[in-house]
Amino acid sequence: MRTFWTLVGYEYRKIFRRRATWAALALGLVFLVVTSQISLFGGYYLDGEFVETNRQRLSADRAFAAALSGRPLDDALFDTAAAAFAAIPADAPLYQATEEYNEIARPYEPVWETLGFFFSSEELRAETTGWGQAFYSQRKTWMAERIGAIQASEATRAALLRWDSQVTQPWTYRFTQGWSGFFTYLEMIGFLVMFLSAVLLAPLFAGEYARGTDPLLRTCRHGVGKLGAAKLATGLGVTLGLYALFGTATAAVMALTYGVEAGDAPLQLLQIGFAYPLTLGQAAAWGLVCVLGGCLLMTALLLLASAALRSAFPVVVGATVLLLVPMMFDLDPTSAPLWPLLALNLLPSRMMKFENIFCPAPYDFFGTVLSQYIVFPAAAILFSLPLAALAMRAYRRHQG
């Protein structure tokens, strides 16, 4: 066993002794940090006049949200938000510039926008109460119609309706901008890990073929089997390391920028049309698991390609195509059969997108319906194991 880990350490040294490796890691981290802060650059303008910087606006929004955080989104809070915005003069050319908005309504804007998903601003001006009950009733009807329109099995639609009925009501209000950014950057984490894995791991097998060093290794006393296993372990370790690096960096950047808000709010605060009864904290955990699964599946494909081909270049090109092309397509489950979307979502780069993980498009296995956030990591493991075995076989055959 000691010899095996010595071989693994040798493979790591080959990867991390290159300056290009460290430059790529540094550029990845810089790219992640800079892109996460772009929206905070500059300022907020009204009618061409500067009002405040975007960071000042974020700070004010966080302060407003802190006063409401933890309150149930019920009749009381929805009614208060509706009344606050109803106080804005209806004929105001720019409601954000009014005194009523800045002094009364602005703290309730996220609540009002949630309510406005189903009701127009004119309807919300009516002198009535009970907006919480109206909101949840309207959403129940809308979800039933939306799920009924999905071209899937009866078992799938029944499961979605059952899951949606389990969403706790009333919802809990939380400041969600940080969570929204984190879920957006789930895809960024996966993209960086997959792309850098392609660059770093493509030469793992193919680099030896191109350099002509494989005939020497063929005579190594450790044997082809142990060498191949060490390379597979190296590929796994590099992917896990990249995932830990960029996942931790993303969580830290979001926490420092937007604060650490409790994750007990429902997932539906971010996407009203999602059916799964998850909190934001639970959804974040499952999202990270799905991204990891996609990264491991991509690594398995990379290792197989590297073991089967004689050059690292086509491995990197193929991995880039496999990473980018599936991200360009999307299918609406209400306008087309569900199965093409389900099949497309099993590709590595599709497993890391927030909407693909939690949208109402579960998998029906002969009447047993499973959500994507369970199927994605399970499928990644099931696919990765035979792919790793095929990579080992290709390496043996090349050596033989």
Image (tube, rainbow, N blue to C red):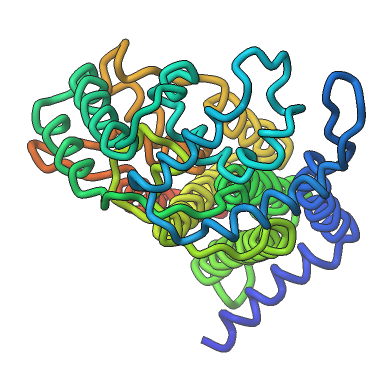
- Quarter-wise, where is residue 144 in the image? top left
Looking at the image, is 154 positioned above or below residue 120? below
Residue 196 spot, x, y in % from top left: 71, 49
Q: Residue furthest bottom?
A: 2
Q: Is residue 100 left or right of residue 284?
A: right
Report the residue at 73% width, 28% height from top.
98
Q: Is residue 77 above or below residue 26?
A: above
Determine the residue positioned at 40% across, 33% down.
345
Residue 317 visible in rendering: yes
Number of marks in picture = 0
Task: Tell me which residue sits at (44%, 54%) in the image.
Answer: 280
Nearer-the-camera pick, 231 or 363: 363
Residue 355 located left or right of residue 223: left
Position above or below: 32 against 154: below
The image shows residue 3 at horizontal and vertical percentages of: 59, 84
Left or right: where does residue 75 sit relative to residue 281? left
Quick one: 21 or 205, which is closer to the camera? 21
Q: Is residue 217 visible?
A: no
Q: 269 or 325, which lies in front?
A: 269
Which residue is at the front of the view, 362 or 325? 362
- Give how far across and how far down residue 132 sits, in percent: 32, 39
Q: Position of residue 371 (x, y in %)?
A: 27, 44
Q: Residue at x 8, y 37 (%)?
A: 367
